[in-house]
Every structure is written in C-alpha cells, then in structure tokens.
C-alpha cells in the first residue's frame, strides 16, 4: 500500500486482529480494480473503528498530523458514509 494515494472503490475481504500486550496488529486484505492488497498495521491501540474497514469505499495511508501524539505515527483513512481513521505505529 502506497502513502498519500487514495484507493478508490475498494472491497475489503478480510480484517483480523491480533493482541500483543496492550497493542493490536490489524491485518487487512482488500481489492481494488486492478489488484489485491494485504496490509498489516502494527501498534494499533484503539480498535473502536476497526469495523468501519468492512464498509470502506476508499482507503489511504498518511503521516499523522500530530507531532504531540504518544503513538500513531501514521493514519489509515477510511471513507464510506463518513470519514474514520485508524492510528498506528508502523506497517508490517
């Protein structure tokens, strides 16, 4: 998955969570018009928005805008009927 690129008309096929202490790994598989992508988000601490991935129409990766955050160097943006983001520390 490329940074600062919006994947349009995605279909998320699979979302898995794995606990590692107080953090989670989130495994996502999604399809675009031309490819199937597998992404692993490491260091996810808030999982409230994970289910939004299943309804995503657009996905994108970007650097976190906040330099003050204790975690979450990156954001996975999710767009369907509204905008959601998942903050994480690194890609696996």
Image: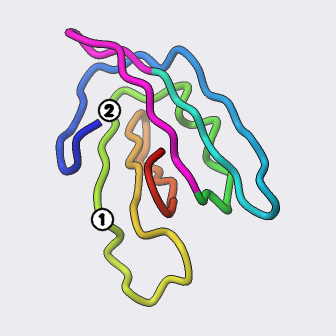
Magenta-tinted stretch: 30-42
Label ID, residue 58: 2
Label ID, residue 63: 1
Residue nearest the observer in this picture, 71 or 58: 71
Of callouts 2 and 1, the N-terminal one: 2
**Badge nearest the viewer, 2 or 1:** 1
- The quadrant where residue 5 appears: top left
Q: For marks 2 and 1, give the CA distance.
A: 17 Å
**Quarter holding the N terminus?**
top left
Q: Is residue 86 left or right of residue 45?
A: left
Magenta region includes residue 40 = yes
Residue 63 spot, x, y in % from top left = 30, 65
Residue drawn at (44%, 26%) of the image: 38
Residue drawn at (60%, 59%) of the image: 43
- The quadrant where residue 37 appears: top left
Q: Secondary structure at mark 1?
A: strand
Q: Is residue 76 left or right of residue 18?
A: left
Residue 55 spot, x, y in % from top left = 51, 26
Residue 45 spot, x, y in % from top left = 67, 62
Colour pattern = rainbow
Label the magenta part by its dominant secondary structure.
Answer: strand
Indicate whether 44 appears above or below 69: above
């Amino acid at each position: 998955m490329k940074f600062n690129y919006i994947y349009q008309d995605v279909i998320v096929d699979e979302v898995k969570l794995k606990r590692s202490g107080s953090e989670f790994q989130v495994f996502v598989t999604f399809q675009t018009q031309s490819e199937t992508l597998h992404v692993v988000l490491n260091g996810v601490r808030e999982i409230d928005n994970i289910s939004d991935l299943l309804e995503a129409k657009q996905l994108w990766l970007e650097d976190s805008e906040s330099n003050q955050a204790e975690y979450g160097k990156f954001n996975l943006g999710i767009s369907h009927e509204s905008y959601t983001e998942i903050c994480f520390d690194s890609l696996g």
